[in-house]
């Protein structure tokens, strides 16, 4: 398990290095400090606004669970969407709960 942690750190550092290198290879006036490494992994090194942080990490109406990180390399988790999905799941057959009993009403 220790080797896996080391590998994850190595990959993370490599992605950051690749993103910074990608930006530094551009002329200064063309550097945006956000984009994708190898056309796949998103990165953003701009200072995020509070609205951007909220939109990324707490947006229950956005259908995606994973979105681009507001700062750094990779993806972030939309906890608002997960919360909404959990609330919607209440009453589904998989959970075994019914909406009536969950809200304190009898299931008669």
Image: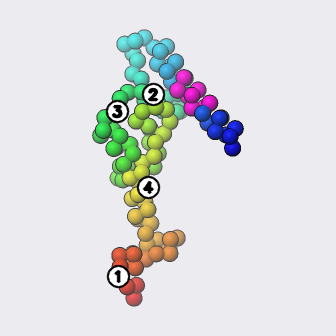
Q: Earlier in the sequence, mark 2 or mark 3?
A: 2
x and y, in percent, of residue 78 in the image: 42, 48
The residue that label 4 is drawn on is: 82
Residue closest to the eye, 105 or 3: 3
- Residue sitting at 49 percent across and 32 percent down? 73
Describe the colour scheme in one phrase.
rainbow
**Magenta region:** 10-17
Neighbor class of circle 3 (other Cα within 10 Å; few <14, some 14-19, many 20+) is few
- Tag 4–tag 3 contact (CB < 8 Å): no
Disc 2 versus disc 3: nearer the observer: 3
- Residue sitting at 39 percent across and 59 percent down? 84
Per the image, is 30 magenta? Answer: no
x and y, in percent, of residue 89 in the image: 44, 66
Residue 64 lies, with reference to residue 41, above or below; the image says below
To which quarter of the image does residue 55 belong? top left
Q: Earlier in the sequence, mark 2 or mark 1?
A: 2
């Amino acid at each position: 398990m220790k080797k896996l942690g080391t590998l994850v750190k190595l990959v993370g550092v490599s992605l950051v290095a690749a993103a910074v290198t990608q930006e530094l290879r551009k002329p200064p006036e063309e550097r945006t400090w956000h984009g994708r490494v190898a056309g796949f992994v998103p990165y953003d090194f701009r200072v995020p606004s509070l609205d951007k942080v909220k939109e990324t990490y707490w947006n229950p109406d956005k259908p995606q669970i994973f979105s681009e990180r507001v700062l750094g390399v990779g993806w972030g988790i939309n906890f608002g969407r997960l919360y909404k999905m959990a609330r919607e799941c209440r009453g589904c057959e998989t959970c075994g709960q019914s909406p009536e009993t969950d809200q304190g009403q009898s299931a008669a």
